[in-house]
Amino acid sequence: MLLRILWLPLLILTLVPLVPIELGWLSPFDQVVSTLPDVLYFQHGALGLTAGHVPYAPGFMTAPYHGVTYLYPPLTLLLTVPPLLAGSRYLSAFSMEMLALALAGTYLLARATWRQGERQPLGLAVLVLMFCLGPLLITRVDAVLGLLVAGSALSLIRGRQALAVAMVGLAVLVKETALLAAVPIVLFCLFPDQDRSVSLQRRIRKVGWGLVPALLIFALFAVWSRGGEVTSMLASVRRGVEIESLPASIAILLSHLSPIHAYQGHLRSEQFAGSDVGLVALAVSLLGASVVAVGALWFAVRRQRPATSIAFCVAVGLCSTPVLSPQYLLELFPLLVVAAYLELPRQRASWLLALGLTAALLTQIEYPYLFDSLIHLQPVGIALILARNVTLLLIAVVLGHSAAQKQVPNGAQVMTLFTRG
């Protein structure tokens, strides 16, 4: 009910400062313009591909980015090519492409539930949460990633395991952060069901068939790039502690004991440095990795609430990674909605959606509009990022508690309905 009441003002809140700027009707605000360099990066990668340059090789991207390594996986590279048809209007065309893909993916996700008799406003809730993240929705590719992961979770609920693996495999080729969802999904498919009616050989075969599309695309680009695709993936891993991550928030809280300072990393991300920052990040990362591993195994053994369990692993990963850019939340939001509407009791679902809405709005306010305040460690910026990261922690706690509980009758009925369908 809350989403039905708020969807129009929330869409106005996110679109009014964005669409006129993207279409060139108004002079751009500096804050929104700060979200556009990634689109220019995409453009020069796409130009390099159409010019016949070897992907991921030195000099692949066109000037002035010819000396910069292209870091995104192959599907992202392919997604950035169509807007080139717009010529000098590449920025607007890319944004419209991402908006169209977000709308189409949401429609397909909602339609898959409608066909099985589930009449909750799932598509509307997904759109509201994604739009509330602001300009990042149409200046990044993460919405495509998030919708693929949500579709994979829905496929698991419906018993289509090969399709679930295929979708999450393609999501990894959009962005490697989808590995947070791929681990529990693949483990779920490999572990036996309760009556052990499917042999291990058949389970492995399903996973193998599901991985074929992603492996073929990956292999094609690996051969074409002469191994440069793998090298670029490793280059993207070597990053410091980003200023918006939970480890950075902990470092801020401890800054009176161990001084910290912000600086710009080699990938132009704002990062923290200090004598204990690396140690804090390592401790949080190890804890998060352990929780994700245990959670994925627990989920695979119990085989209950797939979307909730996958969302839990993604949320824990976002909380524990030292590299947390605001668009990463787009991987989580569609999963939250699928879990809330299909697997959780009404009251808990409402709390989860309210937390997701809070995290989205806090993130949009923090980036791009008040990002300078955070970079300069001003009280407003610090308060915003601390509130956002606490909200993410609460989301992980609610998801973990829900995934650990026995399946409620409503969720069991939905799962049975999908399986029979």
Image: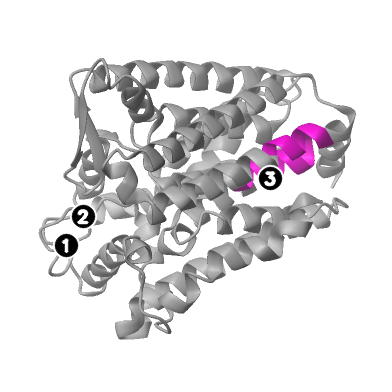
Q: Is residue 354 above or below residue 287?
A: below
Whole-number angstrom distance, CA of label 2 to CA of label 1: 6 Å
Q: Is residue 81 above or below residue 308?
A: below
- Circle 1 is placed at which residue position? 60
- Circle 3 is placed at which residue position? 337
Instruction: Estimate the x, y position of residue 19 in percent, counting from the top left.
Output: 49, 74
- 259 vs 156, nearest the viewer: 259
Could you tell me the amino acid type at mark 2? Tyr
Name which of mark 3 and mark 2 comes first in the sequence.
2
Q: What element carries label 1?
A: loop
Stretch of the chain drawn in magenta:
334-352
Residue 351 located within the stretch drawn in magenta: yes
Q: Residue at x 56, y 23 (%)?
A: 296
Could you tell me the amino acid type at mark 1? Phe
Main secondary structure type of the part rendered in magenta: helix
Q: What element carries label 2?
A: loop
Specify the quadrant of the image occupied by residue 185.
top right
Specify the quadrant of the image occupied by residue 23.
bottom left
> Residue 56 — which label?
2
Other-residue count near label 3 (Cα within 10 Å), few / some / many at <14 / 14–19 / ≥20: many
Residue 385 located within the stretch drawn in magenta: no
> Residue 287 — which label?
none
Q: Which residue is drawn at 53% across and 71% down?
A: 16
